[in-house]
């Protein structure tokens, strides 16, 4: 190989080596930049994910704290009502963890309706609940008679399981035409003497407050939106944003409505009928100056019915429903599930009339049934063939012919067999206090501390 060939080869080799070197330098820098970019994106994604997870966790914590603050607000208001019995008021409660609750309470039938808004950071939670009272020591008895001058007399197939408190006359059996005479006193429990002053006393100021409150609502309903139509009103046509409504006298409500969040008040200056195809669910109040009929087939849950004259239910389904009126009749086939309240009270002293609360044959009632009357001859009647579970109170007379699982407190027992009125007698029916489940709550209308508790979370 001569020199020229070696030069050419050297030139080629050198040229080739130089080309290879330049190519490696060109690819390395973009590769490194790409790798750095990818690693940066991965790191950013990881940091962003951790940030979002932390933010989500903090938001969940805030939601839970706001929820607990709202629930605590309800409990704080219950404790405050226990001591002050204020109603229709608003309060702010601060908690140790920096959360707070804004709470408002309004009358809801014979109960209290509490709306509590809990705040934690920028998160808020709303809880609503109804408050009722513990039944008190007197309701631990199966039967207590306030009129201590009368003896408790059993005849027929009447019986009591639980403790009984009566006057000095004690307990005996008696003969009555058409009824068998018990061979022994049919009481499975202790019989004690009841001092007249130890019989539970009604908080009359609270009763008057309830009457005044609903009379004022009716009086001020003239400023409320009114329906000009008469006859049948479809509940479906009522807007969710509407808080109150006036309907003409003689109106029948039909179809369905649900109010889980905000109350709806329906006012009427005459009679109202709840149609057989109606379904009223949630916070709905019907307030009228005359009478209310809840027809067979209607379904009602969580509602309040207030009538200045009378309420009658046919074969209806009631749950968590309050009936407040001087005259109340739960007709045959009515099914009222706990926690229902049927309360016979005078709502308008200017129109004082006779009172009655009848749980008819074939009706079932669970909850609190009460009659508070200034007259001595008004009666709460649990008819033969009816079933009641809960607490029964009458400041006047009680006819105890049905079956009661719970407690009965009355000024006196009474029934009429022509031509004689019998006081202090039980001719049929039974009272079983032992089988009543724990946790019963009643309307907070008795004197003394109410020991308010949540009846239902709404």
Image (cartoon, rainbow, N blue to C red):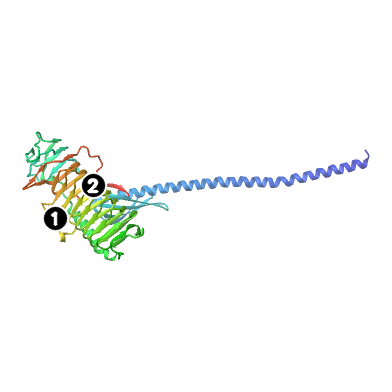
First in sequence: mark 2 or mark 1? 2
- Of helix, strand and loop, which one carries label 1? loop
Position in image of residue 338 (x %, y %)? 26, 45
Q: Is residue 448 visible?
A: no
Identify which residue, 212 or 68, lies in the foreground: 212
Residue located farthest toward the right when viewing the structure as drawn: 2
The answer for how far apart the CA atoms under marks 2 and 1 are is 25 Å
Indicate which label's residue lies in the foreground, 2 or 1: 2
Q: Is residue 63 visible?
A: yes
Residue located farthest toward the top when viewing the structure as drawn: 183
Identify which residue, 173 or 10, lies in the foreground: 173
* Residue found at x 9% / y 37%: 180
Q: Relative to 399, is 132 on the left or the right?
A: right
Position in image of residue 140 (x %, y %)? 19, 41
Q: Relative to 41, is 219 on the left or the right?
A: left
Find disc 1 in the rendering and name its residue. 354
* Residue found at x 67% / y 47%: 33
Q: Which numbered tag is attached to residue 333?
A: 2
Q: For the image shown, how many numbered marks are present on the structure?
A: 2
* Residue found at x 45% / y 47%: 58
- Of helix, strand and loop, which one carries label 2? loop
Identify which residue, 163 or 367, lies in the foreground: 367
Q: Which numbered tag is attached to residue 418?
A: none
Position in image of residue 2 (x %, y %)? 94, 39
Q: Relative to 210, is 423 on the left or the right?
A: left
Residue contact between numbered discs 2 and 1, judged by CB atoms under 8 Å: no
| Circle 1 residues within 10 Å: few <14, some 14–19, many ≥20 | some
Position in image of residue 1 (x %, y %)? 93, 38
Q: Quadrant of residue 426?
A: top left
């Amino acid at each position: 190989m001569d020199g020229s060939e070696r030069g050419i080869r050297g030139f080629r080799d050198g040229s080739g080596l130089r080309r290879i070197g330049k190519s490696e330098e060109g690819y390395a820098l973009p590769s490194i930049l790409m790798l750095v970019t990818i690693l940066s994106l991965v790191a950013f994604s990881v940091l962003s994910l951790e940030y979002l997870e932390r933010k989500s966790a903090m938001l969940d914590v805030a939601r839970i704290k706001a929820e607990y603050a709202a629930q605590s607000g309800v409990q704080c208001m219950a404790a405050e009502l226990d001591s002050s019995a204020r109603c229709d008021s608003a309060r702010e409660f601060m908690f140790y963890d920096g959360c707070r609750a804004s709470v408002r309470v309004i009358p809801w039938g014979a109960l209290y309706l509490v709306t509590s808004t809990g705040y934690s950071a920028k998160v808020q939670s709303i809880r609503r609940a109804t408050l009722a009272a513990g039944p008190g020591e007197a309701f631990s008895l199966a039967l207590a008679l306030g009129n201590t001058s009368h003896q408790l007399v059993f005849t027929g197939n009447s019986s009591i399981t639980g403790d009984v408190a009566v006057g000095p006359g004690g307990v005996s059996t008696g003969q009555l035409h058409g009824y068998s005479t018990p061979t022994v006193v049919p009481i499975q429990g202790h019989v004690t003497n009841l001092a007249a002053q130890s019989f539970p006393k009604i908080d009359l100021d609270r009763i008057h407050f309830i009457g005044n409150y609903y009379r004022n609502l009716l009086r001020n309903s003239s400023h409320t939106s009114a329906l000009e139509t008469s006859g049948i009103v479809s509940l479906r046509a009522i807007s969710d944003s509407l808080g109150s409504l006036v309907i003409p006298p003689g109106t029948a409500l039909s179809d369905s409505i649900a109010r889980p969040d905000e109350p709806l008040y329906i006012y009427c200056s005459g009679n109202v009928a709840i149609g057989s195809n109606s379904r009223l669910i949630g916070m709905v109040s019907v307030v009228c100056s005359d009478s209310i009929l809840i027809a067979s087939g209607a379904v009602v849950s969580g509602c309040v019915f207030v009538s200045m004259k009378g309420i009658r239910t046919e074969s209806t389904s009631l749950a968590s429903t309050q009936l407040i009126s001087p005259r109340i009749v739960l007709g045959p086939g009515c099914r009222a599930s706990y926690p229902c309240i049927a309360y016979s009270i005078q709502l308008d002293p200017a129109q004082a009339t006779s009172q009655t609360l009848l749980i008819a044959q074939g009706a079932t009632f669970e909850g609190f049934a009460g009659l508070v009357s200034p007259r001595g001859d008004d009666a709460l009647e649990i008819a033969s063939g009816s079933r009641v579970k809960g607490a029964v109170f009458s400041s006047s007379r009680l006819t105890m012919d049905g079956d009661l699982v719970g407690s009965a407190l009355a000024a006196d027992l009474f029934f009429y067999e022509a031509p004689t009125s019998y006081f202090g007698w039980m001719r049929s029916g039974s009272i079983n206090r032992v089988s009543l489940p724990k946790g019963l709550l009643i309307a907070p209308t008795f004197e003394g501390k109410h020991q308010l508790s949540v009846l239902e979370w709404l």
